[in-house]
Amino acid sequence: MQRTLRRGFDGMLWAALLLPTLFWAGNFIVARAARGEVPPFALAFARWGIAFLCLLPFAWAAVRRDAAWYRANWFTVLWIGVPGVTGFNTLVYIGLQYTTATNGMLLNSTTPALILVLGALFWGRGMTLVQILGLAISTLGVTTVILHGEPARLITLDFSRGDLIIFLAMVCWAVYTLGLTLIPPQINRLGLLTVHSGITTVLLLPFLIWEISAGRVPSFSPGALAAMAYVGVVPSVLATLLYMKGVALAGPARVGQFIHLLPVYGAVLSMIFLGEPLHLYHAVGFALILAGIVLAGRTGAAKAPARG
C-alpha cells in the first residue's frame, strides 16, 4: 500500500515538474500557428476571458476574503497586473506575428537577467561582480538570437521586429515579477491571478473592437476555436495549478530550474508542428543565455516564476 502511494506521489511530482513548461511552450506554438486565423488581441482576449471563467470557481472564496485589500490598493494591483498579465501575453502574441516560436522561447529565457537589471536600477537590489558577468553573458546570448547570428545586422540596425516586441514582453514580465514582492504574502496568489485575468479581459476589449474594425476579424473555424480554448485553459489554468502543486511538493528552487526546459520543448515542437528549422545561432544563443543565468544564480539571484 505504501509503495503504491509512493508511486502515485512520484508520478504527481514529475507531472508537476515536467508538464507546466511543456504547456507554456505549447502557448508559443499555438499562437504562432494560429496567427493567420486569430489576430493577437483576439487571442489575448480569448485567453484571459476563458481563464477568468475557469479560475473564478477555484478562487472566488479567496477573492472575496481579500476584497478589502484589493479596493484599498487598486493602483498597485493595476500597475503590477497591466505589464505582467495584459502587456506580456499580448506583446508575445503580437511578436509571434513576425518571428518564429523558437526565437520567442529563447528570448523568454532572458527574464532572470532582466530581473537583475531592473531590480538594481529601481528596487535598490545590489549586484555582485559575478552577477554582472552572468548578465553580460546572457545579454550576448540575447543579442545573438536577435541578430540571427549575423553581427552585420547591428551595423545596419537590421533587427527582427518580432524579436524586439517579444523582448519588450520579457521586460514587462520582469516588472511584474519584481512588483509581486509588493503584494503581502497573505493575499492568495490564485485569487490575484483571477483578479488580473478579469482586469485584463476588460482592458483588452477596446483593443479587440479596434482590431475587428480594422478588418482583422478572428476566424471561428475548428482550428481557431481549438487554439483559443488551448491558450485559455492549458497554459493559463492547468499549467498554473500544476506549477503550484510542484512548488508545494518540491519547493520553489527545484521547480524554478525546470523553466529552462521551455526552449528545449519549444525547439522540438516547432520542428514537428511548424516546420521551423533550427540554426547554429539558436544553440549558441541558448547556451550563452543559460550559462549567464546559471552564473548569476550561483549568488542567489532571484528566479522568475515560470509562465507562458
Image (cartoon, rainbow, N blue to C red):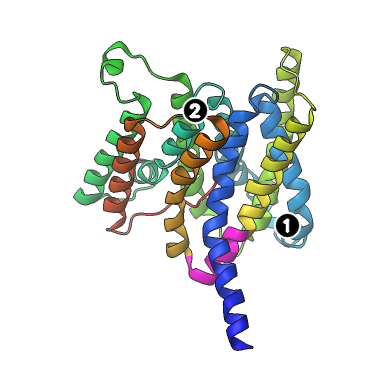
Q: Residue at x 33, y 14 (%)?
A: 157
Look at mark 2 in the image and give the residue it sits on: 100
What secondary structure is marked by label 1? Answer: helix
**The disc label shown at residue 63, or none:** 1
Disc 1 to disc 2, C-alpha distance:
38 Å
User: Residue 101, how many percent across, how many down?
Assistant: 51, 32
- Nearer to us of marks 1 and 2 is 2
Q: Residue at x 35, y 46 (%)?
A: 116
In-image side of 79 versus 221 (left or right):
left
Q: Which residues are magenta?
A: 242-251
Report crowding for label 2: few under 14, some 14 to 19, many 20 or more residues within 10 A (C-alpha): many
User: Residue 282, how many percent across, how many down?
Assistant: 36, 34
Q: Mark 2 belongs to which amino acid? A: Thr
Toward the viewer: 31 or 216? 31
Magenta stretch: includes residue 247: yes
Q: Quadrant of residue 205?
A: top right
What secondary structure is marked by label 2? Answer: loop
